Amino acid sequence: MGQGYDQSTLVLFQGKLIEARFEAEAKLQKNGQPVLVEELSGAEGWPEKRNCIEKHISEKLQAERELKDIDEALQRIASGTYGICLGCREDILLKRLLLIPTAKYCVSCQQKKSKHNFPHPVSVLKH
Ligand SMILES: [Zn+2]
């Protein structure tokens, strides 16, 4: 059974998460502008424009997902379960949390989860 991290470590991660939250919010606002349909109606250059919209949408979705992950992590700090794996209830390594402050699972549970939910975006794990 994991004990979680001490208060000073939690405060450190809380600061990191709040900072990341501001960044994700700014990204969301930047990408939150409605796409102008008139600008996109011409057939000329359509593939490029479509790529542009798809990129725009995926960036927005990613920022929304980031915000959700950050909020969940902040909630776990508030409830005292931050840094404890949701799978095996053991402490998540500090090294992993420093790399991914929103990590919910330890490395082995994350790997098991990724296999079950295949295909899984590998990029999420690298952040
Ligand atoms: Zn685990």
Image: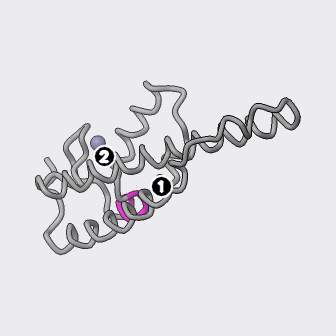
Q: Secondary structure at mark 1?
A: helix
Q: Is residue 85 left or right of residue 20?
A: left
Question: Which residue corresponds to the image point at 39% horizontal and 40% vertical from the top-left?
Answer: 110
Q: Which residue is mark 1?
A: 29
Query: Which tag, 1 or 2, sits closer to the chain's start?
Result: 1
Whether ligand 1 has any atom under 8 Å from the Cβ at mark 1 is answered as no
Q: Position of residue 44 (x, y in %)?
A: 88, 34
The answer to whether 83 is drawn above or below residue 107 in the figure is below
Which residue appears farthest toward the right when viewing the image? 44
- In terms of depth relative to the viewer, which is nearer, 17 or 32? 32
Q: Is residue 100 left or right of residue 1?
A: right
The answer to whether 54 is drawn above or below residue 78 in the figure is above
What is the crowding at mark 2: few (fewer than 14 residues within 10 Å), some, or many (at least 20)? many
Q: Secondary structure at mark 2?
A: loop
Residue type beneath disc 1: Gln
Residue type beneath disc 2: Lys
Q: Is residue 33 left or right of residue 79?
A: right
Determine the main secondary structure of the stretch shown in magenta. Answer: helix
Q: Which residues are magenta?
A: 96-100
Q: Position of residue 37 (x, y in %)?
A: 67, 35
Question: Which residue corresponds to the image point at 43% horizontal and 38% vertical from the top-left?
Answer: 111
- Which quadrant of the frame does ligand 1 lie within? top left
Q: Which residue is mark 2?
A: 104
- In terms of depth relative to the viewer, which is nearer, 127 or 109? 127
The answer to whether 95 is drawn above or below residue 39 in the figure is below
Q: Quadrant of residue 49?
A: top right
Q: Are marks 1 and 2 in contact (CB under 8 Å)?
A: no
Residue 121 part of the magenta-drawn span: no
